[in-house]
Image (spheres, rainbow, N blue to C red):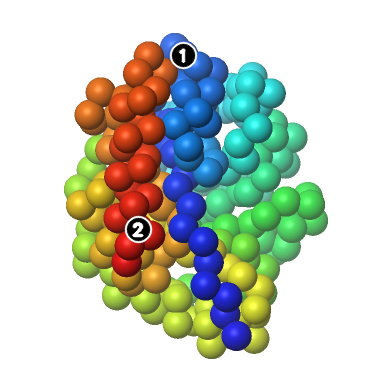
Amino acid sequence: MTVARPILIAASVLTADFSRLGEECVALEQAGVDRIQWDVMDGRFVPNLTFGPDVIASVRDKVSLGFEAHLMVEHPDELAHRYAEAGCELLIVHAEACRHLHRTLDAIGGLGIAAGVALNPATPAETVANVLDLCDMVLVMTVNPGFGGQKYLASMEPKISQVRDMVAASSTGIRNIDIEVDGGIAPETAAGAVKAGANVLVAGSSLYRDGGSWQDIDKLADSVKSIRSVAESV
Ligand code: DX5
């Protein structure tokens, strides 16, 4: 029996003020997000370059929120332990970047932290069929990775439902696997994603578009509340 999973909001700091990452994470914690997502990009797997492990480690002790690293990198096996040491409790690797996905996920579990698999828009849900026993989360990308502020791909909703059904049907159905979506998540798109089966919503630019920032935490909190209330009313 698959237990209904709680709605969680994971804030992406890709749109935050990089010169104030500590303040931004403190503000997000006060604004009520459930965890922080670090969009790690190597300029190879995606055409953008972002956070090294030392940047994340520098912020780790400023908040008590959980950190997840979304590894949009060509060689996640070489970097995983660095992001675990930096204080990430969940590492998300892209299936497209892993020649031996089963081994990679097993190795992340061996680090004593949670493991997730991300699927780009063109990657079928079946890709994770044989590794669900090693997954704590499946991330269905609702944009092509690399940048914040892109348009939500509603065409991914059938794939979200496919993953949901695979998890429910698998022998690991009781393993409480979260289904996360990332890209274009906002109050106007959250309902579709949750109806399809997602329970973890990554939000970046939509949190900041109405003036929310480390300097206006109330507006940030309003944006978080808007997404959460839409998601929880599905
Ligand atoms: C894409 C990134 C973004 C980011 C959130 O590579 O993964 O999806 O987390 O972006 P927005 O601004 O669409 O919420």
Query: At label 2, which amino acid type do we have?
Result: Ala
Mark 1 vs 2, N-terminal side: 1
Decide if ligand 1 comes within 8 Å of the CB at mark 2.
no
What crowding class fits label 2: few (fewer than 14 Cα within 10 Å), some (14-19), or many (20 or more)?
Answer: many
Q: Quadrant of the N terminus?
A: bottom right
Expressed as whole percent of the image width and height from the top left, the position of residue 191 reads: 28, 61
Separation of residues labelled 1 and 2 (CA atoms): 29 Å
| Numbered label tally | 2
Between 148 and 212, the one nearer to me in the picture: 212
**What residue do we see at 35% from left, 29% from top?**
220
**What residue do we see at 52% from left, 31% from top?**
29
Query: At label 1, which amino acid type do we have?
Result: Arg
Above-or-below relation of 89 to 127: above
SS for dot 1: helix
- Closer to us: mark 1 or mark 2? 2
Q: Which residue is mark 1?
A: 20
Q: Quadrant of residue 135?
A: bottom right
- For residue 72, say whether it is visible: no
Above-or-below relation of 222 to 6: above
Q: Which residue is mark 2?
A: 231
Above-or-below relation of 127 to 232: below
Specify whether 227 is left or right of 128: left
SS for dot 2: helix
- Please give the label number shown on residue 169: none
What crowding class fits label 1: few (fewer than 14 Cα within 10 Å), some (14-19), or many (20 or more)?
Answer: few
Expressed as whole percent of the image width and height from the top left, the position of residue 85 reads: 74, 35
- For residue 167, say whether it is visible: yes
Q: Quadrant of residue 192?
A: bottom left
Expressed as whole percent of the image width and height from the top left, the position of residue 133 reads: 66, 74
